[in-house]
Image (cartoon, rainbow, N blue to C red):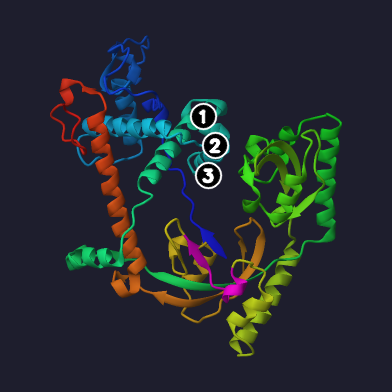
Amino acid sequence: MKINKRKTIVLLAGTILTAMGLQAGAFHASGPKTLSDSVKTQSTNPTNPKSIVDEVVWVVGDEPILKSEIEIMKLQNEAEGVKWNGDPECIIPEQIAVQKLFLHQAALDSIEVTEAEIAQGVDQQINYWISLPQIGSKEKLEEFQNKSMTQIRQDLHDDYKNRQLVQKMQEKLVSDVKVSPAEVREYFKKLSVDSIPIIPTTVEVEILTQTPKVEIEEVNRIKNLLRDYTDRITKNETSFATLARLYSEDPGTARQGGELGYMGRGILDPAFAAAAFNLTDPKKVSKIVESEFGYHIIQLIDHRGDKVNVRHILLKPRVSAASIETAKEHLDSISKDIRNGKFTFEDATAYLSDDKDTKNNHGLMVNSTENARTSRFKMKDLPTEVARVVDTMKVDEVSMPFQMINTRGKVVCAIVKVKARVPEHRATITEDFQTMRDIVTAKRRKEVLHDWVVKKVKETYVRINPRYRNCKFQYEGWIK
């Protein structure tokens, strides 16, 4: 089972970046073309930051930073319990200004974020909010934000887009940063013992999975539903997008009417890709397609070169309790044979495991990150169900069967073996070279980004209200 650690969106008490007004507009080193240095507002609500006479306190290129933006961000961070390492009145406007520099460069470099990426990010944020105990529903979220769901989505749209633009711009700037083994050794050689990082407990885990069988009656039920949806779309009784929003079990696309965005053939399930790329008429619906994720019907939106944009409706057959119990009993029999020495766990995975990601690798789970692939997992990086089982196991021990959801969203039953466990310790070159290289690489990248900001500040028109001139800024050059 390959685990891909994707970036997640940080919970915000409100829409901070929208309040900050981050927009990638035109910058001019000579200064702004037009600018009003004070903005009066009509609000009489004393709790509203805009109830005071607003003013422009910083100008970065053509972009003003308003006093109200700083106040709003300060209030929201206080609500979240953010601790500032310094004066927030100085830190916040500088952070906003730096964001504007990255956004401006992203616009110059034609960096883009697709609507599909934005939609997925917005959904992820909203779903996370709703999952919180103090929220729990869309209605509570609307009450908490004092906005309709449509307004929340609109606000989050620009928030997420700007964050992704900044992130992609930063990734481009540091893409060539590499460190050699000699640099890693030299960096840690200079550290005092107390400064060497603590490495949490890590484990290597082998897994064998069995997928419970789905009864034919359940498959027929799913197919009949999809045929009914196709019939209703063909008769123009409703649209594909409407049915996707109502019934699709793909949480990443359902709220967008099933739209996937432009995708290449290689990143799609093979059966799904074959059907999607064979579609030529946007008015027609595909035949039912079975993939690793379930059963789909697909509708073409557009072809663009070697990519296709389609809508789909995904339905997942329900697995009965009886099928799950049968799979567990089979795994229990396998685990007993392993313990009795009839064959090894590794041999069993090659012949008996359903997990395509691990069965040809002796069942060894792989932890894939942006920087590396490794067989080592911190406990927090394992799937929840696996971590719960592994936590109390000894090395070479084989677990009892348990139920989990795999990376494709399907119910599977599994047994695991702990291949290795390395207790918490201070990092060493021999045991933790990859972790140490990541630390040095991150430091180098931070230095590159810092130097880029300093250089960019020198090239950009900046005007700061005199009250900020005594601030201790992270980046030099703001005061000119």
Q: Which residue is mark 2?
A: 114
Above or below, 422 against 75 in this view is: below
**Which residue corresponds to mark 3?**
131
Q: Residue 88 magenta-drawn? A: no
Q: Nearer the viewer, mark 1 or mark 2?
A: 2
As helix, strand or loop, the secondary structure at mark 1 comes to helix
The N terminus - image quarter = bottom right
Whether residue 401 is visible here, answered yes or no, is no
Screen quadrant of the C terminus: top left
Q: Quadrant of residue 162?
A: top left
> Mark 3 or mark 2: which comes first in sequence?
2
Q: Earlier in the sequence, mark 1 or mark 2?
A: 2
Q: Which residue is mark 1?
A: 152
Q: Position of residue 129 (x, y in %)?
A: 50, 40
* Extent of the magenta region: 358-368
At which x and y percent is residue 453?
27, 37
Residue at image position (43%, 37%) is: 165
Q: Is residue 420 visible?
A: yes
Residue under the image location 45 percent in, 77 percent down: 420
